[in-house]
Image (tube, rainbow, N blue to C red):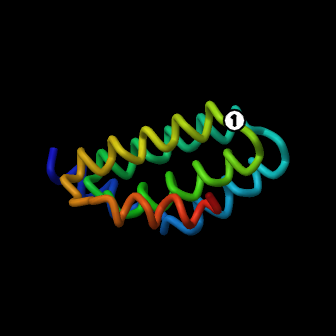
């Protein structure tokens, strides 16, 4: 099991590659398809216990979806962001959450 997890972790691309691809899909107007891809990609990173990358992807995705007025999609990604913080046992506080909101332009 641990070997499988390590193998999966090694084959995952850098977060920015996913962010760029998903950004393109959202900008083409395929919001639902992008949303499903966000969930699929995030699941792979979390199962490989790589938590920083999915947080970057989720943050970018939530902001992007909200920018395109896709409130439900953006909110769902924001919720997944919070769940990933908990799963990864990543410390967070009001400052962390405020800086996340600020970078979304809110």
Quarter that holds the N terminus: top left
Residue 15, percent from left and from top: 50, 65
Which residue is rendered at x = 33% and y = 54% of the image? 8
Which residue is rendered at x = 32% and y = 59% of the image? 94
User: In the image shown, does 96 or 37 lie closer to the viewer?
Assistant: 96
Which residue is rendered at x = 77% and y = 46% of the image? 68
Query: Quadrant of the rendered structure where residue 99 is?
Result: bottom left
Residue 103, percent from left and from top: 57, 66
The residue furthest right is 28
Compared with 23, 14 (above or below) is below
User: In the image shown, does 19 or 102 lie closer to the viewer?
Assistant: 102
Which residue is rendered at x = 48% and y = 44% of the image? 78
Residue 83, percent from left and from top: 33, 41
Residue 4, percent from left and from top: 24, 49
- At numbered mark 1, what does the secondary structure look like: helix, strand or loop? helix
The residue identified by callout 1 is: 33
Quarter that holds the C terminus: bottom right
Whether residue 71 sits left or right of residue 56 in the image: it is right
Whether residue 16 sits left or right of residue 51 in the image: it is right
Circle 1 packing at 10 Å, graded few (<14), some (14-19), many (20+), is few
Query: Quadrant of the rendered structure where residue 51 is?
Result: bottom left
């Amino acid at each position: 099991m641990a070997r499988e997890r390590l193998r999966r972790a090694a084959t995952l691309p850098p977060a920015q590659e996913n962010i760029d691809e998903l950004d393109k899909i959202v900008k083409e107007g395929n919001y639902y398809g992008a949303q499903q891809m966000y969930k699929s990609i995030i699941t792979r990173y979390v199962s490989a216990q790589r938590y920083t990358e999915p947080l970057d992807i989720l943050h970018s995705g939530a902001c992007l979806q909200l920018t395109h007025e896709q409130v439900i999609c953006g909110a769902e990604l924001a919720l997944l962001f919070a769940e990933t913080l908990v799963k990864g046992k990543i410390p967070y506080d009001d400052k962390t959450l405020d800086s996340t909101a600020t970078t979304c332009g809110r």
